[in-house]
Image (cartoon, rainbow, N blue to C red):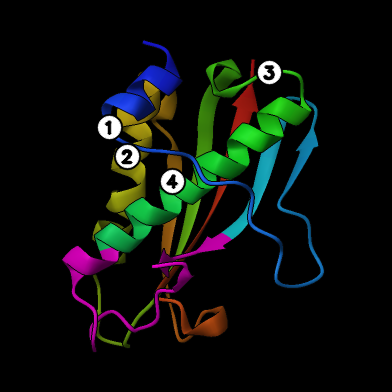
Amino acid sequence: MNVYDKLAELGITLPPVATPAAAYVPFVQTGKLVFLSGHIAKKDGKPWVGQLGRDISTAEGQAAARAIAVDLMGTLHAACVAAGTDLNGVARIVKVMSLVNSTGDFTEQHLVTNGCSELLGQVFGAKGAHARSAFGVAQIPLGACVEIELIAELA
């Protein structure tokens, strides 16, 4: 299935690339690999603030990670266009790295990150299966609850 048809079926509209909040670019391509900078969780256009294990549940964290996946796909779309293709030209989602703003005793970072991983699998099918790391951290910029970066390979 066409990636854009799958997005439409899921009711997902890709956002434009967000303006970087510091001294970096949204993505870099080297060879066939595209590296996307970390994207923080946003709710209603503002940073989705909170800490897992204190004031955000695992289910809410999964929703935040899913929202990040949508933003990542918007940036990946822009990277694909810059490379002369579109999301159908993605050969594989290679790796996802997730940072979860969590208390010292919270141990479900991997479940939070599933919100992103599962959506990528739904949209890209077998090409969406990826390697992954999920870390608990003491803080994320702007107090966001989750930040995720992604590496993809273009065909």
Q: Residues within 10 Å of mark 1 (few under 14, many from 20)?
A: few
Residue 78 on the magenta segment = no
Q: Residue at x 61, y 43 (%)?
A: 75
At mark 1, the secondary structure is: loop
> Which residue matches tag 1?
10
Residue 49 on the magenta segment = yes
> Which residue matches tag 3?
85
Whole-angstrom CA distance, mark 2 to mark 1, is 10 Å
Whole-angstrom CA distance, mark 3 to mark 2, is 21 Å
| Badge count | 4
Whole-angstrom CA distance, mark 3 to mark 4, is 19 Å
Amino acid at the residue labelled 1: Leu
The answer to the question of whether label 2 and label 1 lie on touching residues, with beta carbons closer than 8 A, is yes
Residue 45 as seen in the image, left or right of residue 20: left
The answer to the question of whether label 3 and label 4 lie on touching residues, with beta carbons closer than 8 A, is no
Whole-angstrom CA distance, mark 3 to mark 1, is 22 Å
Whole-angstrom CA distance, mark 4 to mark 1, is 11 Å
Q: Residue at x 76, y 19 (%)?
A: 84
At mark 4, the secondary structure is: helix
> Which residue matches tag 2?
119
Residue 3: image location, x then y, percent: 43, 20
